[in-house]
Image (tube, rainbow, N blue to C red):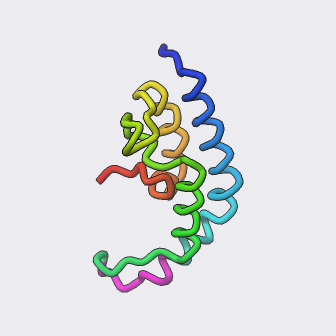
Amino acid sequence: MFNISERGQQFYQRTKNFIETEIEPIEAELIEQSHQANNHGDWTQWRWPKQYYTLRQKAKEAGLWNMFLPDDTLGAGLSVTDYAPIAELTGRSLIALNIFNCNTP
């Protein structure tokens, strides 16, 4: 077992609240809209609905951006043990990792 810092716990709670209030209420609809708009099969032309980009901007403004980066300048500056529970939380959603810009390349 590892310890999560107070700062890590605050980020976890803020991320959880954002997912519950901003992502979960529209996630299914957003995914459905994406599939309908991108049924052409060309991944290079994939586009998300406007709400997706709005959520990303809200996450960035809330300071929930690049949380996986331990660097304070490029990311949230969280340690691996502070970010691990957040990664578990965001992994329950199909789009949360993208919204928070924490998806793997």
Q: Is residue 16 left or right of residue 67?
A: right
Farthest residue to the front: give it: 73
Look at the image and say whether residue 36 sits in the magenta stretch.
Answer: yes
Task: Name which residue lies at 71% across and 54% down.
Answer: 21
Q: Nearer the viewer, residue 27 or 83?
A: 83
Q: Is residue 24 above or below residue 6?
A: below
Task: Name which residue lies at 36% across and 36% down.
Answer: 71
Q: Nearer the viewer, residue 98 or 38?
A: 98
Q: Nearer the viewer, residue 15 or 57?
A: 57
Where, quadrant-wise, is the C terminus in this rendering? bottom left
Q: Nearer the viewer, residue 73 or 92?
A: 73
Q: Is residue 30 left or right of residue 105?
A: right
Q: Is residue 96 above or below residue 78?
A: below
The mark tally for this picture is 0
Q: Is residue 6 above or below residue 99?
A: above
Task: Name which residue lies at 55% across and 76% down.
Answer: 50
Look at the image and say whether residue 80 sits in the magenta stretch.
Answer: no
Q: Is residue 16 above or below residue 85?
A: below
Q: Which residues are magenta?
A: 34-42
Task: Name which residue lies at 36% across and 85% down.
Answer: 40
User: Where does the image place residue 35, in percent across and percent down from the top left?
Assistant: 48, 76
